């Protein structure tokens, strides 16, 4: 598997605005220059979408531990190969059957920064979301950080939601935003899948837009990654909701 993305910056804030995983056929390797050609035929080349919370990614040769601008990265609007991290390792080892295909990765928020929970960043997201329907100015970029939910474009036949299962009651707008994306995915006819906690049950997970994140700790660590493998274990692959 290979990972590619496109970074953008506005007012010294950095965003990962596009992210794709390419599942190589045996002996195959592509470059970032090949990606635009593949995306010209999205309906044939993109199998589905993974939906996460926010990125903490870096181009190959850079670090995600500090801003890319401080490392001399040039935001040139081009696709670039991405460093692998723990999350990408899980997808590579647990998702199979998409050789020669892309899976798009989307995020609730495109702000490219690790460990935003809990921080003042979430307070700002919550305030921004309330302003999105109006013409009020937001702290984070409307275009680069947030989705126009009613017009959201989701690639492929499925959406696998894995943005986590904890929404703070002090940030109700973030929860409402997540729920609206989940509901919109059904309206536009996508097969919806996720891993859910048996303690919440499937219906409660959907009502609360709470879906387990692939990177878990403790007893759930192995159970979640095994559940992801089982959720995608169909032929041809079309993931389904799966209890951990």
Image (cartoon, grey):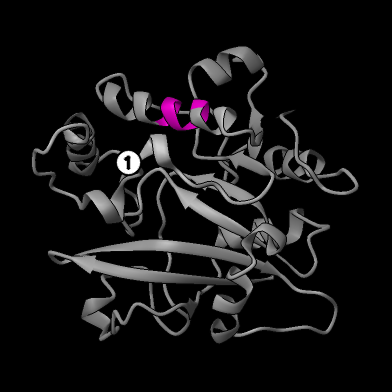
- For residue 42, side relative to residue 237 (left or right): left
118 versus 209 height, above or below: below
Q: Which image quarter holds the N terminus?
A: bottom right
> Which residue bears the numbered disc 1?
117
State whether the magenta stretch is mostly helix, strand or loop: helix
Where is residue 169? Give x, y as percent.
31, 19
For the C terminus, the image quarter is top right
At horizontal 38% and vertical 63% (from top left) the residue drawn is: 16
Q: Residue at x 48, y 19 (%)?
A: 208
Q: Position of residue 69 (x, y in %)?
A: 23, 78
Residues rendered magenta in the picture: 178-183
The residue positioned 33% from the left and 59% from the top of the image is 112
Q: Is residue 64 magenta?
A: no
Give above or below for 220 relative to 27: above
Question: Is residue 126 found left or right of 160 in the rendered image?
Answer: left
What residue is at 31 percent from the left and 46 percent from the top? 146
For residue 98, side relative to residue 73 (left or right): right
Q: Is residue 244 at all visible to an observer of this figure? A: no
Q: Residue furthest right?
A: 235
Q: Residue 137, how many percent across, how many down? A: 9, 44
Picture quadrant of residue 188? top right
Label 1: state its secondary structure. loop
Count residues near mark 1 (Cα–Cα under 10 Å), then give few for <14, some for 14-19, many for 20+: few
Lateral position of residue 176 relative to residue 228, left or right: left
Q: Is residue 90 visible?
A: yes
Q: Quadrant of residue 148?
A: top left
């Amino acid at each position: 598997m290979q990972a590619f993305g496109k970074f953008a910056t506005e007012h010294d804030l950095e965003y990962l605005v596009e992210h794709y995983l390419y599942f190589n056929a045996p002996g195959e390797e592509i470059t970032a220059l090949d990606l635009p050609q593949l995306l010209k035929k999205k309906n044939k080349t993109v199998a589905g979408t993974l939906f996460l919370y926010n990125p903490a990614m870096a181009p190959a040769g850079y670090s995600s531990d500090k801003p890319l601008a401080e490392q001399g990265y040039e935001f040139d609007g081009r696709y670039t190969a991405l460093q692998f991290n723990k999350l990408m390792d899980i997808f590579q080892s647990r998702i199979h059957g998409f050789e020669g295909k892309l899976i798009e990765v989307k995020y609730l928020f495109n702000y490219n920064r690790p460990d935003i929970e809990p921080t003042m960043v979430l307070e700002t997201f919550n305030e921004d979301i309330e302003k999105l329907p109006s013409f009020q100015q937001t702290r984070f970029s409307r275009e680069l950080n947030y989705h126009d939910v009613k017009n959201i474009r989701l690639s492929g036949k499925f959406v696998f939601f894995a943005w986590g299962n904890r929404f703070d009651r002090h940030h109700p707008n973030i929860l409402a935003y997540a729920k609206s994306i989940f509901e919109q995915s059904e309206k536009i006819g996508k097969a919806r899948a996720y891993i859910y906690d048996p303690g919440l049950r499937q219906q409660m997970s959907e009502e609360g837009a709470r879906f387990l994140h692939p990177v878990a700790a403790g007893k759930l660590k192995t159970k979640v990654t095994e559940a992801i493998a089982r959720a995608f274990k169909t032929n041809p692959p079309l993931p389904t909701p799966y209890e951990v």
